[in-house]
Image: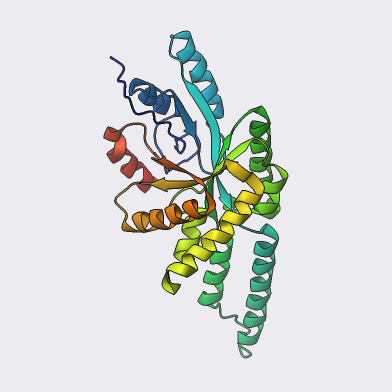
């Protein structure tokens, strides 16, 4: 196959594979790397959800490509699950659990001793436990890779994990050296500001995004990037406008990503079928 070339240089900084994004992405890292190379790419980041399971595939296939005369750079990364404060998250959960216990005691049927479950309480608890936002993290150098390993490991500690591994500002402050961070997708940290505040108007959305930006810039400095994406979801385009405005206000660099979940355009049907298995 003749390798395609382009005058427009593009590096994919947000991609998922079956190695680490099970039931969400298809294609192993080597499939993504080969397609990228064949279409003129020189590097590709792998940012699977909450883990770096694909890293070994990246390393081994990059060596294979080099032996074949293909110069290609694998970028090591992760799309982490983030909350501003894990301590506050745990406190909120514990408080909700205590409220549920008290409510159950009050509703206990005195005659039969049966306990009536409150569906609203259960949904509230599940909402707390599943809460998270996406955050793209990329290793800039060996120090960054080491810190990324530490962040991922910390996110799986029992106090930080329920269905999803999580990290917060405190952990990022501790282990940010050598890491580039970006705001991710419609499930990302800027998107969270949008979803939570859009009913209150533009200024509410922007102020929430400004506060997130202040926190991230305080941690990462010029290694914090505002990420926009292009797809057919109307909310994505609305979000892009907010992100562009905040980027201008703070002098942030913008990146655009594909957030790819399959190695080539022809594989989208297979991916749709695969996601339904999960």
Which of 51 and 101 lies nearest the eye of the viewer?
51
Q: Residue at x 37, y 54 (%)?
A: 236
Q: Residue at x 36, y 25 (%)?
A: 35
Observer able to see residue 156 = no
The residue furthest bottom is 111
In the rendered view, would you say 204 is above or below 20? below
In the rendered view, would you say 66 is above or below 115? above
The residue furthest right is 174
Which of 266 and 40 lies nearest the eye of the viewer?
40
Q: Residue 202, percent across and down? A: 43, 68
Observer able to see residue 34 = yes
Residue 127 lies left or right of residue 15; in this view the side is right
Q: Residue at x 55, y 29 (%)?
A: 55
Q: Residue 53, percent across and down? A: 55, 33
Which of 83 and 173 lies nearest the eye of the viewer?
173
Q: Residue 164, percent across and down? A: 57, 51
Q: Residue 52, percent across and down? A: 57, 35
């Amino acid at each position: 196959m003749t390798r395609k070339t382009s005058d427009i240089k593009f590096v994919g900084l947000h991609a998922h594979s079956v190695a680490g994004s099970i039931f969400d992405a298809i294609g192993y890292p080597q499939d993504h790397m080969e397609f990228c190379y064949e279409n003129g790419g020189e590097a590709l980041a792998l940012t699977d959800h909450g883990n770096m399971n694909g890293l070994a595939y990246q390393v081994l296939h990059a060596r294979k490509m080099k032996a074949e005369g293909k110069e290609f750079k694998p970028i090591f990364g992760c799309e982490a699950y983030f909350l501003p404060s894990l301590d506050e998250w745990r406190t909120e959960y514990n408080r909700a659990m205590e409220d549920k216990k008290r409510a159950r005691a009050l509703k206990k049927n005195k005659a039969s001793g049966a306990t009536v479950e409150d569906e609203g309480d259960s949904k509230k608890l599940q909402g707390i436990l599943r809460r998270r936002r996406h955050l793209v993290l990329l290793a800039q150098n060996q120090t960054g890779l080491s810190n990324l390993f530490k962040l991922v490991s910390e996110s799986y500690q029992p106090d930080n994990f329920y269905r999803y591994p999580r990290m917060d500002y405190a952990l990022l402050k501790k282990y940010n050296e050598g890491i580039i961070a970006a705001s991710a997708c419609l499930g990302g940290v800027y998107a969270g500001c949008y979803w939570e505040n859009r009913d209150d108007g533009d200024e509410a959305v922007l102020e929430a995004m400004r506060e997130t930006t202040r926190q991230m810039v305080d941690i990462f400095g010029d290694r914090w990037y505002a990420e926009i994406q292009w797809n057919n979801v109307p909310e994505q385009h609305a979000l892009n406008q907010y992100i562009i405005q905040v980027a201008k206000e703070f002098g942030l660099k913008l990146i655009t990503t594909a957030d790819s979940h399959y190695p080539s355009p022809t594989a989208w049907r297979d991916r749709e079928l695969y996601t339904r298995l999960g």
